[in-house]
Image: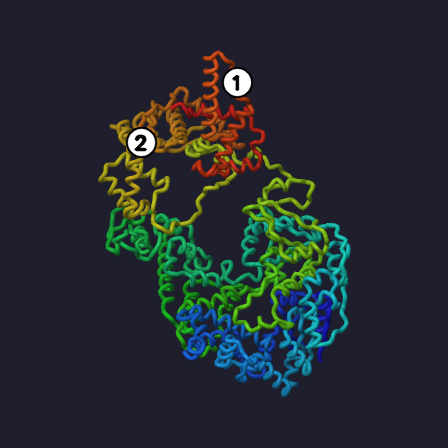
Amino acid sequence: MKMKYSSNDLGYLCGILAEHTGERNDNIFEKEIIVTQSAGMTAWLKTELAKRNKVIANVVFMNQDSLLAEIFLFFFNQRPANTRDILRFNVYGLLAEEEFRTAFPAVAGYYAESPLRRIQLAAKIADLFDQYQLYRPEMIIKWEAGEYSVDNPSEAEKWQQWLWKKAGIGSRVTVRNKVLSEVEKNGNDFKKSFPRISIFGITVFTRFHLEFFNKLSEYTRVDMYLCLPTDQTEFKNDLLLSFGDKALELGDLVGRYFCEPVEFKEVSFNTDTDLGRIQNTILNNMNGIEFSDDGSVQINSCYTPAREVECLYNYLLDLFEKDSMLKPDDVLIMASDIDKYSPFVKAVFRSAPVKLPFKVSGAASNTDDSIVSAIEHIFRFSEDDLTSEKVISLLEQKRIKQRFSISDTDYVRSVVRNANIRFGRNNSRDHETNYVSWEYGLEKILLGYAMLTEKEFPSRDGSSLFPYRDAESSESYDLLRLKAFVKKLEWVVDEKLNPRTMAEWKDFLLEVIDGMIWHDDFDKEDRADYSSVFKSLSYINNIASSEKVPFEVFLDELDSLLFREPRAMNLNTGNITVSSPVPVRGIPFKVICFIGLDNDVFPGKDKYMGFDLIGDEKRTGDRNRKETDKYLFLDTILSAKKKLYLSYVGQNVKNNNEIPPSIVIDTLLDCIDNDKPLRKHPLHGFSSLYCKADDKRMFTYLYGSSKSGSKFRENPSKDFNEIRISDFIRFFQAPVDWYFNYVLDIRYDEPEDIIDETEIFELDSLQKWEVRKKLLSLNKDEIEAWFEKGKKEGYLPLKAAATVALEQLEEEMEFIIPAYRKLTSGHTEEPVFIERSFENIKISGIIEGVYGKEFIGYSVSDYPLKYKIDAYIKTLFLLAEGKIESARFIDKNGFVSAIPGDQKTAVSCLTELLAYFVEGKKAPLFFTIRTAEKEKEIAEKEAKAARKAAEKGKPHDPMTTEEKIDKILESFNNEAFPDEDSRMYPNPCLQVLFTHKAFDKFGMNEIDVIRDFSSKLKLFAF
């Protein structure tokens, strides 16, 4: 017995299914079979049936292939051995046979001696064989009979037929026929175990499966629940004409091979909204939409995927604020590429001012901190990856860290960095790279843990080492665990070199999981993750071959069967569902958002291989990804109950050129003959475009109130009651940068917390400062000894690079050293601690460079003004505290100048500077050293021109105010956006000020501030 229920509303069909499943409540031990096409549909049905029937029990959900396998198991006590996984490995073995290589040398030449290429080709062939069984069963039947499908077969068919025959695996047709034969013989037993089979919501059928269901209906009840956009077969609606080919094909296939059309239950849509009117025209197969732009359909064009997600967040938060009845689980977010978009969703939704609850479903198993992700990271780790950053990054994986009981990975990271571990296990003593190896570094760390000393000790590699001095802490046990982890990792790297059988590789995998990856047997997700590993590799037990294969073959198997497989589907979690489109296809939600509808991404395109025998001749029912995706988009429009939100990357971030959207968006806009639902969003979320009140869709919750202006206003959130002298000085060297760094907490040049993976090739600023300091105080022998120790401790370059660095700095300090030693002769350096309060601000810190009663500052730069500011302010503090009587400054050429200042005026000078500091922490102070130079240059030129005019008895034509302002603004602009010839780095802080039009009201008052600021810093006085 067979029945077909057809409607445009999935909820209606679910209601009928609920009635039917509820009829058997008198016998809960009777098994109910429901066949669906996706995990998402299964999850939705479970919840809906439970809601409608209060309880569901003994309901088994499966897909079409699983049903065939289940019935085969019922009759033969085993599952069919024709799975794609088993077939792939059989083909892998056959490709290595000499008979095949001799008969088909062109094919064999592709993989030659590469096992990886061989398994990859086998995977492609197994996939094609799987398709042939569904879409070209008659060809497979002929192959099994030793024939070809045509009289003059192609070379591709010849070698594929050879492989299929040699594989000796029963085809799906053979399996199906065996099952149907047993059903015919044992009809009563079959009906008793399978009293009813319900086929629900499937949108893609093949003739193979429909014929199977039709035959089963002769022995048991088979109900089909078919959801179609309309019951009409001659499409007139533009959207149906563009997207409905597969819908038409679906209805035709079901009608021909399963059941003739029955009454179509039409459920009308709400025509009070634009979305409902679009849906109704599809249902009624007509055109003409009265589009009012009521917000029920929105389309956003953005510059980047990250901006897409930011705009989506703003949209959803606004919906939740306006509709108190809307719940998170009423919202579905579909992403064309879930693995690409899920990190952006997590970053934006978790860090936003108001956090929206969400659950990502269907992403690849190797995402997040899953067991599968940890396996992939370990198995992809190679000898070349034995670098400091890669090893510590691997250790920071949640499950690996827990397995080795590491309590503080930040501490471990800092120790590895400070111990100068860079790369390699042992490395070369001749090149001195052994000093940056893991073995040398771990030996330093453990010796430092065992004893507190600065003595030099012999090392295992025959050189010597200085114990790492900072291993004494409560976290030091983590250092022992670090060594255990590194040794275990090296063991994995070594073991991967030994070929094994697939069964042995599986055992190796389980050994790695047990020894290196933590999992909780009481956690539901962990159990699912752990079982997925066994499930994906279960076919290995059915492989007859005992051939030993290299690790790369096993890794490729893991990649296709485990790493890239989607994780479990989670619906009805109470959160916003974020998913790839296919698993949630057709499931109704109040709000459906589809992001990533880019022109080159959706709909997808079929990629046919040159030896694909299906691609030569297209038939009804064949796979067609492009048409399937278009039908999916049509389903998406019909599944949205209240709101439909679409977005794509539509603007080029490099040149601002427009990028066309997916053809489905173009078609939708053409259909409604209106571009009102489309909005083009700016590159940045803090753009002033969000301040415009005339467009209610341009707003943001992520960057403050969208109604607030873009000007920099006073920021009272930080009072700076206490500040270090070094930070105080940085303000006067670059007030604008200081405001961004210390007030706004924006640092464009802040280095990432990444450990260097190569030895030091050149010194950074801090290392150069340390070497210069040593050059000023040590003799040549002491410098060389210090350099040798520095190489072993890890703060200086190795081998020739060390010599070059020393020579460069000695040359740089050539004139400074004699001048410095002459001034400091007879005195020792005494660092001075300063702590001084001005009103409510306490400034403190250590000042070096004090010799007796004099402070000595110096600069090796060709542009010393920054260092003069540093020296002058330090001089003022030392004078104010009575620590010195005078101060000197040495420039690069060894010229010595006196730093102005005395004890009587030092406090008043600091007070004047403090007034600028107080103002500069409220809003950016428009000052840079280069603009101060430009202002001085303008003033000097004006004075010179006035003098010359006076000497000649002519009137002086001074520069206008506007000209002065333009000159200074030009100087600021040149720093923000320098040309390539200037050899200056762009100043991103100034760029932001220009972008936000902060200089629009710049005038003579600001120029006076620059002049006075320079004067108070004595910028050009010495």
Q: Position of residue 777 (x, y in %)?
A: 27, 34
Disc 2 on helix, strand or loop? loop
* Residue at numbered disc 2: 830
Res 73 seen here: no
Viewer-side residue, 871 vs 250: 250
Disc 1 residue type? Answer: Asp
Quadrant in which the N terminus appears: bottom right
Residue neighbourhood size for the residue with mark 2, other residues' Cα within 10 Å, grouped as few (<14), some (14–19), many (≥20): some
* Count of picture labels: 2
Residue under the point 26% across and 56% down: 461
Q: Which quarter of the rendering shows the C terminus?
A: top left
Q: Is 217 on the left-hand or right-hand side of 936?
A: right
| Element class at badge 1 | loop
* Residue 957: mark: 1
Query: Could you tell me residue 694's position as x and y percent?
Result: 69, 41
Depth check: give the residue in front, 322 or 344.
Answer: 344
Left or right, 96 with reference to 921: left
Label 1 Cα crowd, 10 Å radius (few <14 / some 14-19 / many 20+) = few
Please tell me whether residue 867 is drawn above or below residue 413 in the rendered image.
above
Q: CA distance from mark 2 to mark 1?
A: 55 Å
Looking at this rendering, what residue extends furthest in the top direction? 953
Which residue of the protein is positioned furthest toward the left in this rendering? 781
The image position of residue 340, as x and y in percent, is 54, 56
Farthest residue to the front: give it.
152
Amino acid found under the numbered disc labelled 2: Glu
Task: Report x, y in % for residue 101.
Answer: 42, 76
Q: Nearer the viewer, residue 509 or 202?
A: 202
Dot placed on the residue nearer the N-terminal end, 2 or 1: 2
Colour convention of the picture: rainbow
Q: Quadrant of residue 998?
A: top right
Mark 2 in CB contact with mark 1 (< 8 angstroms): no
